Amino acid sequence: MKKAPKTFEEGLSRLQEILSRMQAQDTPLAESVKLYAEAADLIQYCNQTLNTAKLQIDEIDDKLQQAVQDTEDLL
């Protein structure tokens, strides 16, 4: 990969650019292979970022659920 994206959105945008470039009929094979490798890295980065976000959301949900349970116990 050229450089790691700074954000999920940046990674996704670059993936879209790569897809457009690879769909162009004038893209040489060697460049297509490089783009494919970059896309694979970006997909891995985006998946990791999404997994991290999911874990954070699950943690927040657990805390919220506990707060609701504690409030119900007081009533």
Image: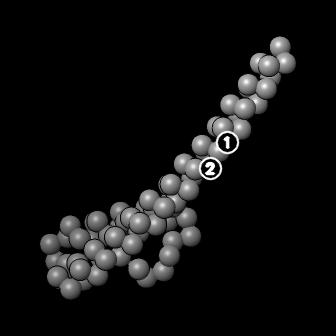
The CA span between labels 1 and 2 is: 6 Å
> In the image, is 27 to the left or to the right of 35?
left
As drawn, which residue projects farthest toward the bottom?
30
In the picture as drawn, the residue positioned furthest to the right comes out as 74
User: In the image, residue 49 lies at what x, y percent?
Assistant: 52, 60
Q: Quadrant of residue 52?
A: bottom right
- Give, as a three-letter code, the residue at label 2: Gln
Q: SS for tag 2?
A: helix
SS for callout 1 = helix
**Type of the residue with mark 1:** Ile
Q: Is residue 29 above or below residue 13?
A: below
**53 is higher (above) or lower (below) than 26:** above
Q: Is residue 14 visible?
A: no
Q: Is residue 41 visible?
A: yes
User: In the image, is 31 to the left or to the right of 65?
Assistant: left
Seen from the viewer's position, the closer of residues 10 and 65 is: 65
Q: Quadrant of residue 73?
A: top right
Q: Which residue is mark 1?
A: 60
Is 49 positioned to the left or the right of 42 in the image?
Answer: right
The quarter of the rendered structure image containing the N terminus is bottom left
Residue under circle 2? 56
Residue for point 23% across, 80% down: 33
